[in-house]
Image: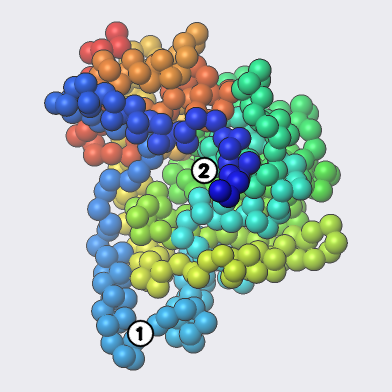
Amino acid sequence: MVKRNENIAKLQAGYLFPEIGRRKKALLEKEPDAKLISLGIGNTTEALSTHIVEGLHKEVTRLGTSEGYTGYDDDAQAQAFLDKLKTRISNNWYNGIISPEEIIVSDGSKPDCGRLFFLFGNNVSVAVQDPAYPVYVDGSVMIGATGNYNSDTEEFDGIEYMRCTEENDFFPDLSKVKRTDLIYICSPNNPTGAVATKKELKELVDFARKNRSIIIFDAAYSEFIREKGLPRSIFEIEGARECAIEVSSLSKPAGFTGVRLGWTIVPKELKFDDGQSVGKDWQRVVGTLFNGSSNIAQWGAIAALSETGLSEIKETVNYYMENAKIIKNGLDGLGIKTFGGVNSPYIWAAFPGKKSWDVFEDILTKAHVVTTPGAGFGKAGEGFVRFSAFGKTSDIKEAVKRLQENLK
C-alpha cells in the first residue's frame, strides 16, 4: 500500500472542532433529550441581509441567460465583475490604502491560510501566537515545516511559540521571540479576543523588517473592532507593505460562512530574498490550486460591500456584539474573569488551576452548553475556555441562565 504522509501522521488527536463534535455526540448518546446550546464553534446563525440576497439572486438569474452566463474568471465579463469586487474591497473596506491589483479574491481566509503554505514550502521557520487558531500550527505541520510532536513540552519542535498571556495583554513580548521566516498574527485574536494596538503592530513590523521575516496577518474579525484608534489592517502601519501579507473574509461580518468569500493582500513591495515578487508567486499558486471564488458569491460580496450592504453588515455585527455583552456580563456576575467580547465576538474566560478540557466537560454535562477549551488553541490556553457570541440572542440568554444556575 501507499505510505502515509508522515507529516499528517505527526498531528495529535483530532482537530479541535471535530473533537468537540465527538464529545457532543457522546453526551447526546447518554442523554438523548438534552437540548445543547453551542457557544463553541464560531459559526454564524443570522440570515443573510436583504441586499446581499438580492445580489445573489441577480447573479443566479443572470447565469440562467445566454447573454449573462459566465464561466472561469478569464471570461471578459466575469473578469469585469471580479475587478468591480476588488475595487469595492479596496475603496469600501480599506479606504483606498490597498490597490485592487494587490487583492486576490478567494473562498475564505482559512483556505488561503492553507494555500499560503505552498507559497513558502517546508524549508521555512514559523512563529505563531500561543494561543492561536489551530490552522497556523497544523498547516505548518502538514507541509513539513516543523519537527515532531514533543510529548514532554506538548508542542511541536521547530515552531516558535509566542506566549500571549494576561501579563503581556495577549500580545507577544518580541524581546523573547526568536527570528523566524514567517510570523502568524491574528487581530482581533481568535481565541483571546484581544486587539493589537498601533504601537504593538509597529513594534511587530519593525521586528519583521529587522529580521527579514514575513508577517501573515489574519484580519478576519476586523469588522468587530469598535474602539476608535485600533488598527483594522496591518497596512495601517508604516513599513508593513515591505513585510506583511493580510488575509480577510466576509464569513463572520456578512454571514458568508457558507457562501464563502475572502481575500488575501500581497503588497507590490513584498519580495523574496532573491528579489522576486511574492505577489506573482502567490498568483501562480492560486492559479494552479484554485479556480476562483464562485461567481454567485462574488456578486453577493459586491452587494455586501455597497453602501447599503455595509450598513446591513454593521447591524449584523452589532447583533453579535450585543450577544457578546450578554455572555461577558453573565460570566462577570459569576466572578469569572473574562477578556475580549468588546472588540471581538469571542470571550476568553479564565478558570485558574483547572484543565480547560475539564471545564469544557463540566459546562457541557451540567449546563448542556458547548464551549471551546483553551488548550485546543495552544499551551498558553490552558486554564481558559472560549465562549462564542455567534448564536440566537434567545439561546445566548438561555445559555447564560444555565451557566448561572450550574456554575455557582
Q: Residue at x 71, y 57 (%)?
A: 241
Q: Is residue 110 above or below residue 396?
A: below
Q: Residue at x 65, y 56 (%)?
A: 118
| Rendering coords of residue 327 (x, y %) | 33, 27
Residue 266 occupies quadrant? bottom right
| Residue topped by disc 2 | 228
Q: Residue furthest left?
A: 33
Q: Is residue 238 visible?
A: no
- For the residues labelled 2 and 1, the Cα–Cα distance comes to 43 Å
Which element type, helix, strand or loop, lies under badge 2? loop
The residue closer to the viewer here, 44 or 229, is: 44
Q: Is residue 292 above or below residue 8?
A: below
Disc nearest the viewer among 2 and 1: 1
| Rendering coords of residue 249 (x, y %) | 47, 54
Q: Residue at x 68, y 62 (%)?
A: 267
Residue 27 occupies quadrant? top left
Q: Residue at x 35, y 84 (%)?
A: 69
Q: Which quadrant, please, contains the C terminus?
A: top left
| Residue topped by disc 1 | 69
Q: Is residue 67 above or below residue 268?
A: below
Label 1 Cα neighbours within 10 Å, binned few <14 / some 14-19 / many ≥20 = some
| Rendering coords of residue 73 (x, y %) | 49, 78
Residue 364 is labelled as: none
Q: Residue furthest front?
A: 1
Q: Is residue 181 visible?
A: yes
